Amino acid sequence: MRRIENPTRPRTIDDLVTGDLIARVTRLDLASRKIFAGRMKGERRSKKRGESVEFADHRPYVRGDDLRHIDWNIYGRLDRLFMKLFLEEEDLSLHIIADCSASMDCGEPSKFEFIQKAAATLAYIGLVNMNRVTLSAMGDAVNEEGQLVDVGGIRSTLRNLRGRRRVREMGDWLCKLDPQGSTAFDSAARRLALTRQGKGVMVVLSDFFFKEGYERGLRYLLGRGYDLVVIQVLSPQEVEPDLGGDLRLRDVEDGDAAEVTISGPLLKRYKANLNAYCKQLHSFCIRREITFLTVQSDLALDALMLDYLRARGVLR
Amino acid sequence: MMWLTLPIAAVAAGVMIPSLIILYFLKLRRRDVEISTTLLWKKTIQDMQANAPFQRLRRNILLLLQLLILIAGLLAVAQPEIRSDEPPPTRSVIVIDRSASMATVDETDEDGNAISRLEKARREALNYVDLMGSGEQRERGNKVREAMVIAFDRNATVVQTFTSDRDRLRRAIEAIEPTDGVSHLAEAIKLANAQEAVVLENVGLVTVPIYMWSDGHIQDLEEVTLVGDTRFEFNSVGRNGTPNVGIVSLQAERDYDSPDEATLFVGLMSTDLESREAFVEVAIDGLRAGAGSVTLPAAAEDGPGYASFVFPLQRTESAVITATVTTEDALMADNTARMILPPAQQVSVGFVTEGHLFLKYALEALRLSRVVQMTPEQFLERAQRGQTSEFDVFILDRWVPEVAPAAPPDLDSAGNEIFDPTLPPGHYLIFNAIPKLRGLFTGEPVREAPYGVLEWRRTDPALDSVSLANLTYWKPASIVATEEVRILADGEHGPLIVEAAHDTVRAITVGFDITETDWYLKPEWVLFLGKVIKELGRGATAGSAEARPGGTLSTRLPAGVTQATLVLPRGDRVTLYPSEAGQVSYGPIDEVGFYRLQWKGPAGSTDVVNGDTVERAIPVNLLDASESSIRVEPQLELNVGIIQAVGAGDGDPRYSTKRLWPWLMVAALVIMMLEWFVYNRKVHL
């Protein structure tokens, strides 16, 4: 729960995704409950009829159609021109949104490190399966003088990576992220919704402790028709606080203070509130067909990928 | 349980407990902790505050522990005590035995250290005083408890009159020191009753409960008189079966035929339940003269075992003899006994008579160094020439130089008349004539009739072992005596034998002629004559004296001594002024040992002359089988019945008070340590 002083950050993609993990997740691929139209040729069946070798349907010829796709066998039998349609295979868009606010830099192990690794692993899976991967960092940006600058909720974005060659680029981008400032989830979601082109799977990694609420932001994202996956990351200390005595709890993001005297009933009440909050988020997501799961930052990544996400159909 | 200073603690509690809670509310020293979000905490605090306004205090173990520390401290301030007995009555008398046997070391304190019976008695009595409550209770309208303290051995002393001041009572009890005397309780009871009568004369007869601490060796139980239903509690101290070997008698007798030889008899007693050997050392004039061992028989149920040790010695002069049992035991006061062996010298007598056959034969029968018969004229001639000092004793037969005047009507004022003594300096035994001496007068002639003796001083050295019970006399001299004269025997007609002293003259006057009695053929007559001459002779040769602890030391100094210094065994010095008869007294005597009387001037025959200083040693011995048998009596037989001892043997100390405040302070300390631990480990429930 408490902020970590001078944490060690991953420096390269190798720190984020270990060789062992790569070996275990390489055979995984992203799955989507919806079929989206891609932008480029890919490995995924598209809504569009295209030029793959797999037959899909016939339709009457209209003027202007490509003569190469006329089914001459049917013309011979029926003396009418029909077009032979084939299934189109396109790429899938995967958009990973990582919460980079200061609050993520708390807990042991750090929630931010977990998010970095989870994002890197998901992006890796997306890249090796020839999907189009976009990564966005939520949070305030820092200018050259070290001051926080409001950038509308999205600090930076790495767009449209594709192919195994971009893995290192993706890793470098993730490693450069530094959790600072606060999260304006509403504006970040709105901005993503407005600027995003194309549809696909969107994974949001955050603790979802937004004082202004998460509902409106999630609705913005839903409205654009994404297959939304919400992963709430909590530190073990947030679940079982290790606090005691008379404390002034200070919010790392906005400096807000709460004076508490830790006692048994207080902790009990806190846990009840946390549980209720998570349940509320879960219920919100379920009702809107958002894939939701809450994980602790001490969860092993292979368990997250191979068990949790596969069980929920995010990976296959 | 009692609370000694409850009001103070209550006031302190009223101030401090709310202060602590207020301080807890105001406590601003909170530790800053940065956390990811306060979203849930704020909500939690709101929930808690909505549910319980005092949530800060709920289950707050630190505050709880601090309150416990404070409560323990405040309880300690209230000084709680647990008392094992019912509180004492409003008035009571504490009587503590300080006799020799109470010095026996056979008790143990709470830590198991050996202490004397008196120390045990003192501690129990102090506990009893603690039960009385403090003087502050008076202000709160509670019962005021008063007590008085009497210490007794042979004599009783009020060491503290009735008071409710516990400090004064405690000081008085702590100041009671053991003496080497024997126990006589009657006087203590009289003192207690007398004090009560003075204080409550308007209230009527109220008997005060008496709480006595003693081992029960009380020699005058038959004289102790308790009034009505007086509550008398006998708190027994000491344990039975403690072995003690003591000297219970010491006597030296010169051989009748060869006075140079003497035999020393040492009587020994053992309370050991097994037969044992005791070593006796005899020292003469401070030098070891001999030693020997005696086998003492085992003590039986009914009493201790006795044995004697006989030591022959050859000595012409007087000697200071010390006999010591060289055994370490519970009671040390009876391990040494001392005595003075008088010199072998015998008395020379001047017999002034016109002729008296019975007296002459009687004197011849006595073993005297010299008897010279003379007529009154010859005596007066010698007196004029100043030659009377060559005889130790003069016997005047029915004649005196000048007869005492007739008794005045107001006898009391007559004592102040100044007499010019007509007798030359010396010691006299006068038969049937009344000399002119201070306090002596001639009364109306007594009718001739047979008279008997009513009472005589059996303990006086002059009449020691002499019975006057069978004496019948016919024509007594009519002696009238004031208080200055000691009456040794009272006959049916009046004073019969008196002792008068005036400066350098000491005279025992016998109011009958032996021929006018039925005594002259009886052996008591010769015994009487011998004792009186011996006593006068000893006085003439400045005899020795002997005393018992608790009693009075009394001896007669040679004529002409005006001041003497008494050196006590422990080294203190007391200046004494002899009476006209040369008598000096000191008492009561507290401890055994030699009391040395020193003066400048003439010396008696047993006295030691050092330059111009004369010294006489007076032995004081316990020599009391009752005190030496340190058995603890389980009961006392008094006139009101048998009083059973309470608190005898092993058991919880009587009247003990357990003070709880140290334990409360320890508890506070432990809780403080626990609080420190909790605070540091951030333990939370």
Image (cartoon, helix red, strand yellow):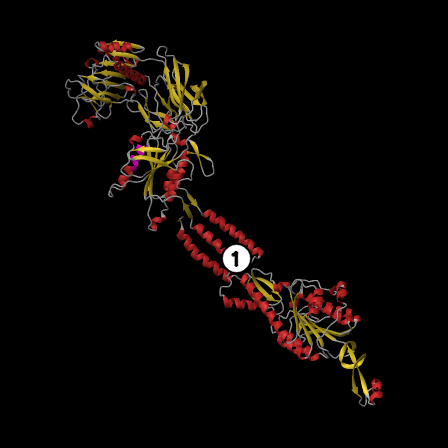
Residues B269 and B335: in front is B269
Quadrant of residue A51 within the rendered picture:
bottom right
Q: Does any portion of residue B424 appear in the rendered image?
A: no
Judging depth in this view, the residue of B420 and A100 nearest the camera is A100
- The residue that mark 1 highlights is B62
Going by the numbered disc 1, the residue's amino acid type is Leu
Residue stretch in magenta: B185-192
Q: Which of B350 and A266 is in front in this view?
A: A266
User: Residue at the location (29% across, 11% down)?
Assistant: B366
Is A69 situated above or below B652?
below
The kind of secondary structure element at disc 1 is: helix
Main SS of the magenta segment?
Answer: helix
Q: Is residue A23 visible?
A: yes
- In this rendering, position of residue B175 left or right of residue B59: left
Position of residue B240 relative to residue A124, above or below, is above
Q: Position of residue B655 (x, y in %)?
A: 39, 41
